[in-house]
Image (cartoon, rainbow, N blue to C red):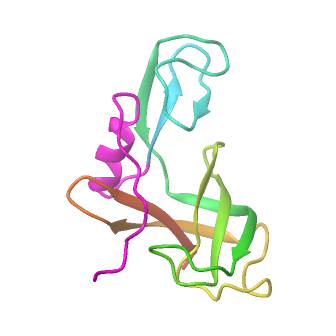
Amino acid sequence: MAEPGRALPVPTPETQGFWDGTNAGELRLQRCDSCGKNYFPPRPFCPGCASRKVSWFKASGKAVLWSYVIHHRPVPGFKPPYAIAVVQLAEGPRMMSNIVECEQTPEALQLDMELEVVFEKQNDTITLPLFRPAKD
């Protein structure tokens, strides 16, 4: 019997632009065309001023490690230990993700360490944005 895989998100009309971006190898965010606020997660209105004049843009993919926890228990689709992280994107918003290509220890996972996005294709619909230590 096959092991169950990682639980995957289900795109909605509000998030489809984000998932289209990750499938194309781009981290896309939304920006309010009225007040200029960049935000995540996607929604049809600005969380700052409530304007519905919003647009998508390609983010840099650069971030810093803002917070994390190292999970040691087995969960379908993950091999422990693994980091569940909150990253602060260069454009301002924070997002939850996983840190890859790095030891999953407090010594290796330093707060404020520079990160870059990498994409992991899960199926024809979902490609996940994950983060690794920046190579620059």
Give coordinates of residue 99: x percent, y percent: 58, 73
From this view, report whether residue 39 is shown above or below residue 111.
Answer: above
Give coordinates of residue 18: x percent, y percent: 39, 42
Q: Quadrant of the N terminus?
A: bottom left
**Principal secondary structure, stretch drawn in magenta:** loop
Q: Is residue 104 left or right of residue 18?
A: right
From this view, report whether residue 9 is shown above or below residue 123.
Answer: above
Q: Quadrant of the C terminus?
A: bottom right
The structure residue drawn at horizontal position 65% and vertical position 79%, both measured from the top left corner, is 73
As drawn, which residue projects farthest toward the left?
A: 124
The structure residue drawn at horizontal position 64% and vertical position 84%, both measured from the top left corner, is 81
The structure residue drawn at horizontal position 47% and vertical position 73%, both measured from the top left corner, is 76
Query: Magenta stretch: residue 3 in it?
Result: yes
From this view, report whether residue 1 is shown above or below residue 126.
Answer: below
Residue 6 in which image quadrant: bottom left
Q: Is residue 127 left or right of residue 98?
A: left
The structure residue drawn at horizontal position 71% and vertical position 76%, both measured from the top left corner, is 70
> What stretch of residues is rendered in magenta?
1-27
Residue 25 in which image quadrant: bottom left
* Badge count: 0
Q: Is residue 21 left or right of residue 48?
A: left
Q: Is residue 2 left or right of residue 81?
A: left
Give coordinates of residue 106: x percent, y percent: 79, 83
Q: Which residue is more in the foreground, 53 or 120?
A: 120
Query: Magenta stretch: residue 25 in it?
Result: yes
Give coordinates of residue 95: x percent, y percent: 61, 50
Q: Which residue is more in the foreground, 86 or 132?
A: 86
Residue 2 in which image quadrant: bottom left
